[in-house]
Amino acid sequence: MSDTYIVHDPRFSALFIGHARLERLWTGGRWLEGPVYVPAAKSLLFSDIPNDALMRLDECDGSVGVFERPCGFHNGHTLDREGRVIACEHGGRRISRLDHDGIWRGLADRFEGRRLNSPNDVVVHSDGSIWFSDPTYGIDSHYEGHRASPELSSCDVYRLDPRTGAIEAVVTDMLRPNGLCFSPDERTLYVSDTGRTHDRDHTPCIRAYAIGPDGRPGEGRHFAASPSGFFDGFRSDDRGHLWASNADAVCVYAPDGTHIGSIPVPEMVSNLCFGGQKRNRLYITAQTSLYAIYVNAHACGFAD
């Protein structure tokens, strides 16, 4: 154990750099979320949801400023296969895309004629489909969106075909689905459930869903139980380890579900992503501040 790393399993030692330390890059937000690395711009975008601001870190000089405000109370982000930013909007209760002409265009805001709750996190499959979670956090109060009554009877994970606009519910067995990501081979979809915010007896966990031959997830299985607090956002590295936000740490899980180590963070961790030129810099959004640490792991799809 050190101030920077907590080792639970020897396998974790291969994933961190002993002399690399956690750095606080910026502070001054209210609740930071949704980091996404944009390689073509050498930038990191991230949300400050209560301040209705989309922030930008310039990797070249380390400066942080407002990229867009208001922004519709963005939460999670990802890139599609053309490098366009896909956003989850609490305010607009929709999925939107920042096209190459600089205009945000809505992709989905309804399911079976009813308004979505408040899209939370999003990932893109190699077939171009957009998968997103839809809990109610953006309509539960005026703090992270606009308080409203849900029109849908449940909170689910959806698959959107951006070519046709078709949307379908693909994970329907969670109370409040939140973070999600695919395994490197895209044979597994991981989804966290933060339903304890609405049911104190609900167990915070990550579930794993095998993707079938039809490209849809089957029945889920338990992958990991939260050691404290909630699993919020997470990402997989190129070797299949899951790096997950959890209360005051980033918890790292082997592909078999073993909690192999943690990186303590001095604030409540919300989300993370890999970035930097070699995609080996772990960016961490944590309540009021943006942190980063270099690790011995890379984002899925990174090629030397």
Image: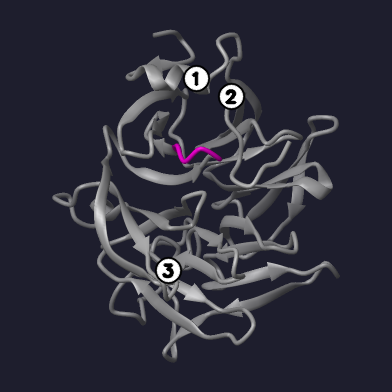
Do tag 2 and tag 1 residues touch (Cβ < 8 Å)?
yes
Q: CA distance from mark 3 to mark 1?
A: 45 Å
Q: CA distance from mark 2 to mark 1?
A: 7 Å
Residue at (13% x, 50% y) in the render: 201
Q: Position of residue 110 (x, y in %)?
A: 48, 83
Do tag 3 and tag 1 residues touch (Cβ < 8 Å)?
no
Q: Position of residue 129 (x, y in %)?
A: 56, 71
Secondary structure at badge 1 equals helix
Left or right? Give the position of 42 relative to 105. right
Residue at (48% x, 82% y) in the render: 167
Task: Name which quarter of the figure residue 199 lies in.
Answer: bottom left
* Label 2 or label 3, whichever comes before in sequence order: 3
Residue occupied by mark 1: 14
Circle nearer the viewer, 3 or 1: 1
Secondary structure at badge 2 equals loop
Mark 2 belongs to which amino acid? Answer: Asn
Residue occupied by mark 3: 147
Task: Name which quarter of the figure residue 293 lies in.
Answer: top right
Q: Is residue 275 magenta?
A: no
Res. 296 mark: 2
Left or right? Give the position of 233 relative to 69. left
